[in-house]
Image (cartoon, grey):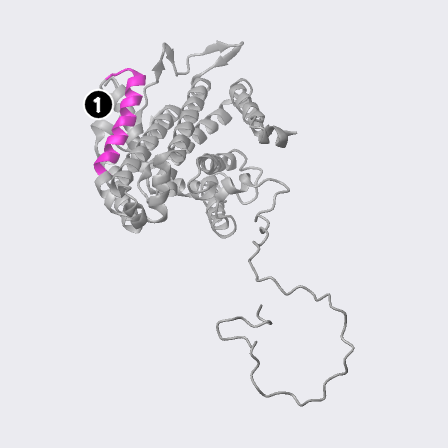
Amino acid sequence: MSETLARSGLRVRTPSVYGWAAAGLVLVALPFYLDRFWLQAGLFAMAAALGAIGINLLTGATGQLSMGHAFFLAVGAYGYCAFAGDGTDGLAGLGLPGWLAAVLAVALSGLAGGVFSPIAGRLRGAYLGIATLALIFIGQHVLFNAHDLTGGYNGRAVPPLSLFGLTFDDTELLVAQVPFGAVEKLWYLGLILLLGGVLFARGVLRGRPGRAMNAIRDHRIAAGVMGIPVARYRAAVFVLSSMYAGLAGVLLALVFQRTVPEYFGMALSLEYLAMIVIGGLGSVAGAVAGGVFVSLLPQILNRYSDALPLVSAPGTGGIAPGEASRYLYGAAVVAVVLFLPGGLARLAARRPGRPENPPPTAPTATAHPPSDPPSTDPPSTDPPSTDPPSTDTPSHAPSNNEPSGEAR
């Protein structure tokens, strides 16, 4: 029935539409049933998914290796604190409204990416990775030593966000007789930001910019020959990736409620690379899946460390949950590279009962010269000839340019 409607030009609603709608309803209803731990873990996963989408646009879709993604998350997080802070804690702050501070922090991350974009537009591969790695060392030096701006080793408190008269702090707000605190309010903000980030990235990849980015990734020289401005596209994607990282940094700061320099180190950049490899390079859904997997794994191990073998709380003699999670998603990276190159996105794209490789198509018929029709003459009754065979070359012998009967 659905095939008949599809052939007639009518749209058929697939079960995936209803699945996405059901998943959306579940996500909206979760703050009414889950405790603070799971909501906070979900917010960390949303922030990680936003940052993973940004680096996937850069590395997965355009083929530019970046090791400095954590630097742009730090710019977004500390930029929001500097713009929204009022200076009462002795640190620099402009006292701007929270929504404006968040917008300016994302723009500041994009500006930082724009400053580095001329280098990103001309370097590629390991050279670009080494160049972006320098951003991590520069950022760590600034975060630890600019005490008046960042608070040094102790970090600085994050001002709450205010939007349309709603303050995202721990002031209780009753919704259907359920008290909503900061985490419950931020849950819906995170959902909106993640949905907007996913839709925008999908639009970029499915449009003309996405085709140009894939062409640059697959063959840079051929893309330039076709008229694609390679350096300009690389620089623009680097800026866009930096803005995604800045937005993720703002959301992380709001969830943590305090920024510390140690978090924005090299390990965080490696985790984001693991996210896009596990989820699937070049896939928006894969980036979201990889971000959720890598960010939730250490928190779940920490939550249930008492019930898991070889995993215990830090300082008790066993493997710490954070260290165990690095082992696990390191093994996941190796397994994906060896056995599932497309990542989790490719695994989800496989349908049950559908062969992995399409069946071979029927070979096309090639034109052969028609064979002689069978003779309808009656069989000859003459006796066989007793003459010796002739040694002369027959006149009907095939020439060098004419195929023989056997070849034919």
Look at the picture and state if 232 lies above or below 107.
below
Q: What stretch is highlighted in magenta?
A: 95-116
Majority secondary structure of the magenta segment?
helix
Q: Nearer the viewer, residue 370 or 140?
A: 370
User: Taking 221 as reference, is 105 above or below it?
Assistant: above
Find residue 245 and report its horizontal and vertical position in percent. 34, 32
**Is residue 73 shown above or below 32?**
below
The x and y percentages for residue 371 are 62, 64
* Image side of residue 232 versus residue 364, left or right: left
Determine the secondary structure under disc 1.
loop
Dot 1 amino acid type = Ala
Q: Residue 19 in the image: x percent, y percent?
A: 57, 27
Which residue occupies 33% across, 42% down?
Answer: 266
Q: How many residues crowd around disc 1 within 10 Å: few (fewer than 14), some, or many (20 or more)?
A: some
**Direction bottom: furthest residue:** 388
Q: Which quadrant of the rendered structure holds the N terminus? A: top right
Question: Which quadrant does the C terminus fall into?
Answer: bottom right
Q: Mark 1 points at which residue?
A: 92
The answer to whether residue 238 shows anywhere in this view is: yes
Residue 112, x across and y down, in percent: 24, 33
Q: Visible in this render: residue 269?
A: no
Q: Viewer-proximal residue, 227 or 256?
A: 227
Which residue is more in the foreground, 317 or 19? 19
Depth check: 153 or 98 in front? 98
